Image (cartoon, helix red, strand yellow):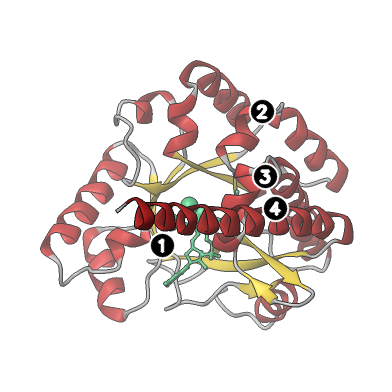
Amino acid sequence: AKESGRNNYQFYTADMNARASEILLVESQLRRALERDEFVLHYQPQVDMRSGRLVGVEALIRWQHPERGLVGPNQFIPIAEERGLIAAIGNWALREACRQNKAWQRAGLPAIEVAVNLSALQFHHQDIANFIAAQLAEFELDACHLCLEVTESIIMEDAESTVSTMSVLKQMGLRLAIDDFGTGYSSLSYLKRFKADKLKIDRSFVADVPGDSDDSAITRAVISLARNLNLQVIAEGVETAAQWQFLQSEGCDEVQGYLISRPLPAAELGLRLAAGEWL
Ligand code: C2E
Ligand code: CA
Ligand code: CA
Ligand code: CA
């Protein structure tokens, strides 16, 4: 028993060491990626359900890894958060989204809203309002063309300072969306205090509508809550016509998902907008 216990312990530490060295490897590669400019943003359309027209795009980060190819954010954002790199990476994304949005406008495309994901650490461990103001000024971008997607975890973490930062951001004219709505543990009372513009219904609820009656009830309730609070409501992860029909009949305002388009490289989105798609 003692013998096997020791073996288990050895396996356990071997696993932990493997995981720890994988994290260290990714961390050092992420630092290099920042220096060598290996990140890219893809943009996923968000359309109005009534008109079918594009209202905005969500900027989603990818890592163009020299050996591993295009790496999705779930593969590196959690490590970036754990290793203190998320502010640098997230700030890069915010800045790049502003630059790209202005470039589309300068190319003569209709002005759209670009939504950027903010990590809780990025929000709390720097003067985010100041950083954003500097980017808007540098790229001469109107604040109303930038939307910040924040999660319930941001809102929960440090309620007082969050309320004041949020109101500064609102006063600057930025748009605020609450991301992954319904997946956090916070009380709904924050909805009164945070003056968001939009609720995003999480993909995990949308996935099984209209077939699953629980998910349908939750989705219906979120849409009705948003409408009663005068918030716009957008469903993410919409893949099927049946989901679209359900959401439309329940009065959802906007949708985002593979049914409309996958996230696209900037150049491709620009071409499709120039061709009049979704307009
Ligand atoms: P999220 O903010 O919930 O983004 C939506 C995710 O759903 C994206 O995954 C998107 O590609 C995916 N998606 C969209 N439509 C569909 C659909 O119809 N079906 C399915 N199955 N998936 C769909 P992605 O791009 O892998 O991003 C994953 C997460 O990484 C994001 O979740 C967000 O939390 C995080 N993330 C992405 N970019 C950034 C960033 O710049 N900063 C930070 N802090 N986080 C980011
Ligand atoms: Ca998001
Ligand atoms: Ca989500
Ligand atoms: Ca998310």
Q: Is residue 235 left or right of residue 170?
A: left
Q: Which residue is mark 4?
A: 24
Judge left or right: residue 196 versus residue 252. Answer: right
Q: CA distance from mark 4 to mark 3?
A: 15 Å
Disc 4 marks a residue whose amino acid type is Leu
Residue tagged 2: 125
User: Residue 236, which numbered label?
Assistant: 1
Mark positioned earlier in the residue sequence (4 or 3)? 4
Q: Which residue is mark 3?
A: 86
Residue 216 rendering spot, x and y as whole percentages: 18, 61
Look at the picture and state if 229 lies above or below 41: above
- x and y, in percent, of residue 52 in the image: 45, 72
**Which of pointers 2 and 3 lies earlier in the amino acid sequence?**
3
Q: Secondary structure at mark 4?
A: helix
Do the residues bearing badges 2 and 3 touch, measured as CB atoms within 8 Å? Answer: no
Queried on whether the Cβ of the residue with tag 3 lies below 8 angstroms from ligand 1, the answer reads yes
Camera-nearest residue between 170 and 214: 214
Image quadrant occupied by the N terminus: bottom left
Residue 61: percent from the left, percent from the top?
Answer: 65, 61
The disc label shown at residue 186, or none: none
Q: Earlier in the sequence, mark 2 or mark 1?
A: 2
Can you say whether 138 is above or below 6 in the image?
A: above
Place of residue 98 in the rendered image (x, y in percent of width and height, measured from the top left): 75, 52
Q: Going from the N terminus, do you reach mark 2 or mark 4 first?
A: 4
Crowding around mark 1 (Cα neighbors within 10 Å: few <14, some 14 to 19, many 20+) is: many
